[in-house]
Image (spheres, rainbow, N blue to C red):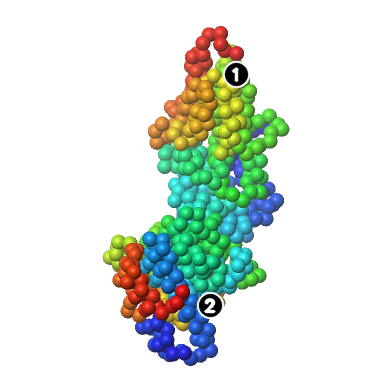
Amino acid sequence: MTARATRDWFGEALVSAGAAHPRVAVVDCDLGSATKTGAFAEAFPDRYFQCGIAEANAIGVASGLAQEGMRPFVASFGHFLTGKFLEIFQSIGLNDTGVVLVGTHAGLAIGKDGPTQMGLRDLALMRTLPNMEILHPADGAETRQMVDYLAARERPAYLRLCRQPLAEVHDRPFRFVAGRPDIVRAGADIAVVTMGGMVRVVLDALPPLAEQGIRPSVVSLSSLPVDPDALRRVCGAHRTVFVVEDHYVTGGIADEVARALLELPHPPRFVGHGVRDYGQAAAPDELYARYRLDSRSIGEQIHALAAEIPVGALS
Amino acid sequence: MSGTMIPSQNRRSAAPGGSAQDEDLQQVEEASRRMRRLAMEMIHHAGSGHVGSSLSCVDIVAVLRFDQMRWSASPRERDVFVLSKGHAAPAWYSALIAGGDLDPDLVTELRQLDSPLQGHPDRTRCAFVDVSTGALGQGLSIALGRAQARRGDAADSHVYCLIGDGECQEGQVWEALLYAGARRVDNLTLIVDANGRQSDGLVDDTVSLGPLANKLAAFGWRVVEVDGHSHRELRAALSAARRNRGRPSAVIAHTTKGYLAPGRAALDGAHSGLLDADALDEAYELIGAAR
């Protein structure tokens, strides 16, 4: 299947969800062309609310629509949307209203526009809200299922989407289950835990490693909160857990995984890898290479972690 | 009934009453007296709260709850009320108690652990709170969403949003004002409790709003200014706002922070603070309401 960005899959899935659920609505912040809500706006003009470049108001309007029984998806760049944290905290979180915040352009992938547009700390903010469900699909199959899942629910949620085209990571049939760590590849010794666009990147790092007998498991943490027991079961079966995220290395899934693992009597070795500064402007490929979040760099890091495991102990 | 019996009718409502319409305002008048007393009792029991901000909007809330709003115990069947200036929660809670929606014993429960009467309104804890508020500037946006979702509903329901004048310094308020005007959301009425004061002092000395009515009009709103302690003026303005079509309506209600009676304000109009026992007794006497 041709590689496509999850935001593109989202735009299509939203139209299907709109047809299946009359209460699904879209609240836009003048970024419909980037967040791919245009098809929905055309199909369901009565359920499309253009709020312009005013995210705080959009969040409030969406909260009001949800309180009246609608299921609004508010779409903008994740960085802009979650920048209105006080508004999300109160108008959506504390009000416990069923708004889906759709934050696109996750991670470094926006490239040359630089750190003022990069969704690098959105997870950290959304993770603090006790009733906020977070979903970050890795491919088209998962995006479609997540949109269907969200359309039928009534609680606050954050859907994190990628700008960069991604090849499918799931072999069919795949079934999304909220909170369940998704074992995309079952391997041994090392568990690479990641999410969203990085799942494909990690998978692409595997073939050269396999030639050297290194076959890590790859786990996609595509929804939070994650079932901690399931996460401990998956990770606890490995010697080393390596978390890779297209996000600041603080506040994201490394923290989520580490918290769960520290409750094990004998936690595995733990290494977290993500962005450690504010990011900068450059072509996406250059950025991912610089921040060691491209397949080659990740392969090197996995290789180094495998080298720490005593000779003969590799399964 | 003569105008002199209505302490809240002061400078602008000189014409004495007497029409059948004014007779109905007797209920609002009694409710507002009781509400003032309840709000003060609540804050006294809590040991903290915003006396001035609550008392400035008691008359507005009384006219809404007891005269203008379509009321029902079921949230789907009643009009919506958004108290964007959430720190005035005691004004709303007192209306709910005075109207028989909440148990009068709750007067001792404001700001207590697990109470439905949180320090700022919380819809997840109190069935008669439509929107949780507290951090200022967010209520009008939510009110707009609710109004847009209710547009053209069979019940012809209405959404009311009460904000403070100091609150208008929040940028989101202007995003919402702009949006409402552009979308011509006409099943919504904004009421500005213009008491002229905010936490650090006078609004004019802090960041003046300038000619607020002109600004709202320029944003596409129909604007009326009234004496916010005159039930008759409030009724006239709010009824007209509800009938108004094609534009959102705003009522700028000029009020006195801590208003007890003409020329008398609790704590001299301070934003917050507590009355001592003597001041409380004096206030209850001025209000002239039994529990």
Residue A311 is situated, as x and y percent measured from the top left of the image, at 53, 8
Q: Distance between the residues labelled 2 and 1?
A: 71 Å
- Viewer-nearest residue: A302 or A241: A241
Residue B123 is situated, as x and y percent measured from the top left of the image, at 53, 58
Residue B244 is situated, as x and y percent measured from the top left of the image, at 53, 76
- Residue at position x 53%, y 31% from top? A260
- Residue that mark 2 sits on: B67
| Amino acid type assigned to the residue bearing label 1 in the image | Ala
The chain to which mark 1 is attached is A
* Crowdedness near tag 1: few (<14), some (14–19) or many (≥20) residues, C-alpha within 10 Å: some
Local SS, label 2? helix
> Residue reaching furthest left?
B205
- Residue at position x 71%, y 32% from top? A173
Residue A32 shows up from this direction: no
- Residue at position x 47%, y 58% from top? B118
Where is A14 relative to B122, above or below?
above
Local SS, label 1? loop
- Viewer-nearest residue: B274 or A100: B274
